[in-house]
Amino acid sequence: MTEEVRRTQLCDVHRQTAKLTVFASFEMPLWYKGIIPEHLAVRNSVGIFDISHMGRVIITGVDSERFLNYVITNDVSVLLPNSAQYSVMCNENGGIIDDFVVYRLETEKFLIVFNASNREKDYNWLIKNAEGFDVKIEGVSDDVAMFAVQGPRAEKTLQKISAEDLSKIGRFKGGHSRLTGVEAFLSRTGYTGEDGFEVFVWNAALSKPDNAVKLWNAILDAGKTFGIEPCGLGARDTLRLEAGMSLYGNDIDENTTPLEARLSFVLKFQKSNFMGKDALLEQKNEGIKRRRVGIRMIESGIPRPGFEIYDDKGEKMGYMTSGTFSPLLKCGIGMAYVKVSQAQKGNTVHVKIRKKLVKGKIVSFPFYDTEKYGYKRKVVI
């Protein structure tokens, strides 16, 4: 039986201008002008993505904080209203059910934004584990449109149509604003490594997408002077990979723990309890056997998921989980899991590409120079 293809509020807009693909059962733009120009627009100026396919739930109630601290690994008690943090949910064995951003909107009101491929799984997991907690879990994915405006000129672009001073919104902070008369919530977050905002358009249900279409077009108009590009999933993948960010289903899954995936910063073991804590403590004490690393190709070749990796002696080290051609670095890059003993920065690796071993090396995340690119850049644009 063929799975029904789902669409976002901007489906008619994308059909007019984009090359479409199906991702996580959603019809989505793969690219508009092309992956490379869209990628470079974000790195050098500004781009906009439709990310309305992602999952969104609102959690309210007197036990909302206590409940979230049980089902996720990070500590939401440190969040003030209009602030956010990156976190994961784990199963009892410490495997990652999903990674996401959680927002505290009010004292007893939280928003979680998770991966499109896990919309139903995550919602059902939250419902399943809410027994005994005084909370309300409301799925709002189809009632809220969501865009990502990313790049060093993202703030200047949105400021042209915002009634508020956006410079006051710090990283992983949020605020309400009216953008060309449309009510929105802005958070200084994203999946590209660059500065930028994710824009939540509350009053934009699938059945009435007018506000989403209006705001999408207004942002494109505001960014014209900066060379803004609408961007598709292709550029989103190359950008997140350059930034060293994991993709669920490729680089992390329920057979991967946060310790193996270099996400230990989201594990707050000082909490009295959270799902997967015992298994993760045991793994931490025993030591992990494999680790996620970045690989930059020295020789010509593009690593792809599933490609095997070998050391100089011909011993198999692991396998690639993500890989692409970097539009910025103009070489192949990727992520892989290798044995901890072989995961040191600078180590030579050989990726098996079309039956040939192609040389690369293990490098730090992100792949680019953080003084020139990304939200920490020192170059003023």
Image (tube, grey):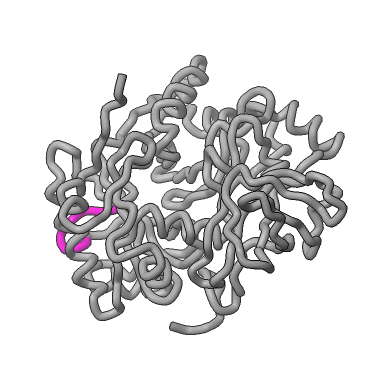
In the image, residue 350 sits, relative to residue 371, either above or below, namely above
Residue numbers of the magenta segment: 179-185
Q: Is residue 164 magenta?
A: no
Residue 283: image quadrant is: top right
In the image, residue 294 sits, relative to residue 91, either above or below, namely below
**Residue furthest to the top:** 131
In the image, residue 110 sits, relative to residue 352, either above or below, namely above
Q: Position of residue 223 (x, y in %)?
A: 26, 73
In the image, residue 375 sits, relative to residue 124, either above or below, namely below
Q: Position of residue 356 (x, y in %)?
A: 68, 54
Q: Quadrant of the C terminus?
A: bottom left
Q: Position of residue 355 (x, y in %)?
A: 66, 49
Residue nearest the viewer, comparing 35 with 55: 35
* Left or right: 317 in relation to 93: right
Residue 83: tell me if it is visible: yes
**Residue drawn at 51 percent across, 15 percent down:** 132
**Residue drawn at 75 percent across, 46 percent down:** 338
* Left or right: 15 in relation to 324: left
* Left or right: 209 in relation to 95: left
